[in-house]
Image: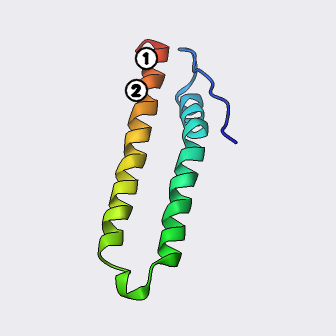
């Protein structure tokens, strides 16, 4: 179940804005990490290094993209 999205008023402190973004991103990050862990557990030892490295890199880049998009959306909501 996804956490409800909350907007961050301009008067929020830095820590409050971080918490809002963390709460928004947490389900997506946990889902991505879960997929990575499952993949790591399931991969045959002979394939432990190789293609899986690209899958892990791509997953990391997707998480970075999610963070950037959430941060940008938060800034637009605050008008900064």
Q: Is residue 31 above or below residue 48?
A: above
Q: Please tell me in which quadrant of the rendered image residue 45 appears.
A: bottom left
Image position, residue 54 (x, y; %): 31, 64
Q: Is residue 9 above or below residue 58?
A: above
User: For the point 61% across and 38% down, which residue is it?
Assistant: 23
Q: Which residue is mark 2?
A: 72
Of the pair 21 and 48, the residue shown nearer to us: 48
Q: Please tell me in which quadrant of the rendered image residue 16 appears.
A: top right
Labels 1 and 2 touching (C-beta < 8 A) = yes
Of the pair 22 and 58, the residue shown nearer to us: 58
Task: Tell me the element at label 2.
Answer: helix
Of the pair 19 and 30, the residue shown nearer to us: 30
Decide if residue 23 is on the left or right side of residue 78: right
Q: Which residue is mark 1?
A: 76
Image position, residue 70 (x, y; %): 46, 32
Of the pair 35 and 76, the residue shown nearer to us: 35
User: For the point 38% across and 54% down, which residue is it?
Assistant: 60
Image position, residue 12 (x, y; %): 58, 21
Q: Quadrant of the N terminus?
A: top right
């Amino acid at each position: 179940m996804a956490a409800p999205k909350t907007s961050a008023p301009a008067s929020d402190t830095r820590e409050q804005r971080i918490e809002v973004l963390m709460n928004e991103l947490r389900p997506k990050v946990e889902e991505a990490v879960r997929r990575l862990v499952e993949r790591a557990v399931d991969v045959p030892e002979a394939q432990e290094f190789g293609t899986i490295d690209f899958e892990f890199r791509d997953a990391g880049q997707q998480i970075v993209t999610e963070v950037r998009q959430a941060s940008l959306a938060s800034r637009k909501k605050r008008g900064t």
